[in-house]
Image: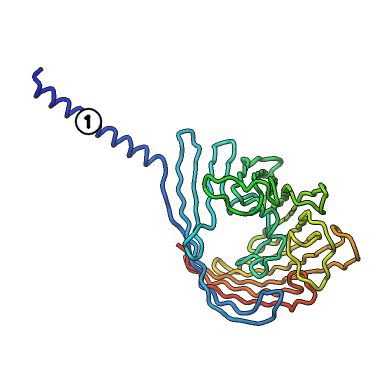
């Protein structure tokens, strides 16, 4: 074969090979996954004050912007994967980022930070049509149960099992450094800090319109209870809830328990308490009811009462318990991608301080989603 013919056939062969390679890459890419963007914005008008130290009222307009990027795909064996990141309001940083791997029959695994740890499925699980009541007060302990598991945790969710007509799902989680902060990409935990590892476990049981969940979380506490003492008590948080739906009406009840493992002197009833700093145990309950008036309009009412029990975890002079009470009524109206929502919340003894002025906050929000 002469040289010119050989080069001709070689060039043709290269073109065929490159065309086949390009086609295979396109096929793999299409099979591997896709990326989507979703989000929304709330424009809010808020009036009142939620501070535990001042009764100064104020009025302000705010915006809450959320944008999330989600990518995912499916493997040949049916296993799916997804990656999600969400931006802050300023859109200069991320509020959360996590990876989910779901197998066809063995369950799913979630790894990341500030999103999706097991406690999100169990805290404040009573019906509400707009915000959880923790929107008005950071010291709603039902919302704080197990939140220390958010630092680069791994959470396993089992397949749903059927037993006697009920559906049962199990959640298990582990964090190597349970301090509710974010470890950067490829980073390692801080080592000998205040806290060590954390574990969580929860069970959800659904039977027709009835749903029940119970959850517990524990983390290693490396802080000594006294100078020169080796005695350390780990932190334990727990919560359970039950919800029931009857046509347009749903009701729910929840109880929570937070023992931060902190020992010390009892705090006075007239001082503001700080969760996981105050020496004591926080116990509480919530009850909620929601009613769908029609396909577009709904209303809900939530009542919460929590108790700071100083004597359960501190010595010295006896100090009476302090109750923090919150009442909230909420409305929601939706029209496709637009919604109008509002709430009014009232707090008695905010931050478990009997001297603090009662708080009342009203918020109206216009929401736009895409």
Residue ID for mark 1? 16
Give 56 or 253, whichever is nearer the viewer: 56
The image position of residue 368, as x and y in percent, is 47, 67
- View extreme (top): residue: 1
Residue 218, placed above or below residue 350: above
Image quadrant occupied by the N terminus = top left
Image position of 315 (left or right of 88): right
Q: Residue at x 75, y 76 (%)?
A: 356
Q: Is residue 366 above or below residue 202?
A: below
Vertical placement of residue 254 versus 73, above or below: below
Q: Quadrant of the C terminus?
A: bottom left
Q: Position of residue 25 (x, y in %)?
A: 33, 37
**Image check: 5 left or right of 222?**
left
Rendered location of residue 121, percent (x, y): 64, 53
In the image: residue 254, left or right of residue 11: right
Q: How many marks?
A: 1
Residue located 55% across and 70% down the image = 333
Q: Residues within 10 Å of mark 1 (few under 14, many from 20)?
A: few
243 or 55: nearer the viewer: 55
Quadrant position of residue 120 = bottom right
Which of the colour schemes (rainbow, by chain, secondary structure, one colour) is used?
A: rainbow
Name the one closer to the observer, 176 or 287: 176
For the point 58% across and 41% down, the residue is 108
Element assignment for label 1: helix
- x, y percentage for residue 142? 71, 60
Q: Which residue sits furthest front?
A: 228
Q: Is residue 24 above or below residue 92?
A: above
**Residue 161 picture quarter:** top right
């Amino acid at each position: 074969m002469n040289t010119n013919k050989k080069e001709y056939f070689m060039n043709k062969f290269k073109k065929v090979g490159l065309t086949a390679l390009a086609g295979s890459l396109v096929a793999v890419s299409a099979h591997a996954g896709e990326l989507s963007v979703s989000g929304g914005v709330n424009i809010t008008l808020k009036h009142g004050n939620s501070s535990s130290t001042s009764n100064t009222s104020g009025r302000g307009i705010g915006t809450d912007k959320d944008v999330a990027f989600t990518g995912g795909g499916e493997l040949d064996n049916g296993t799916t994967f997804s990656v999600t990141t969400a931006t802050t309001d300023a859109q200069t940083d991320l509020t959360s980022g996590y990876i989910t791997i779901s197998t066809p029959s063995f369950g799913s695994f979630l790894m990341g930070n500030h999103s999706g740890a097991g406690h999100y499925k169990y805290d404040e699980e009573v019906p509400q049509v707009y915000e959880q009541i923790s929107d008005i007060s950071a010291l709603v302990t039902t919302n704080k149960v197990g939140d220390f598991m958010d630092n680069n945790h791994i959470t396993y969710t089992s397949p749903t099992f059927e037993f006697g007509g009920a559906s049962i799902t199990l959640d298990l989680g582990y964090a190597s450094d349970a301090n509710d902060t974010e470890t950067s990409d490829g980073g390692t935990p801080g080592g000998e800090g205040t806290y060590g590892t954390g574990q969580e476990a929860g069970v959800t049981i659904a039977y027709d319109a009835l749903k029940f969940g119970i959850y517990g979380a524990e983390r290693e506490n490396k802080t000594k209870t006294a100078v020169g003492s080796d005695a350390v008590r780990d932190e334990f948080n727990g919560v359970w809830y039950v919800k029931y739906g009857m046509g347009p009406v749903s009701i729910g009840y929840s109880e929570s328990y937070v023992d931060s493992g902190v020992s010390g002197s009892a705090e006075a009833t007239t001082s503001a308490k700080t969760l996981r700093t105050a020496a004591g145990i926080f116990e509480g309950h919530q009850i909620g009811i929601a009613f769908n008036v029609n396909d577009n309009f709904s209303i809900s009412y939530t009542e919460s009462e929590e108790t700071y029990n100083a004597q359960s975890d501190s010595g010295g002079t006896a100090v009476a318990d302090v109750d923090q009470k919150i009442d909230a009524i909420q409305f929601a109206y939706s029209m496709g991608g637009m919604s109008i929502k509002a709430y009014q919340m009232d707090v008695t003894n905010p931050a478990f301080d009997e001297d603090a002025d009662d708080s009342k906050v009203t918020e109206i929000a216009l929401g736009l989603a895409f």
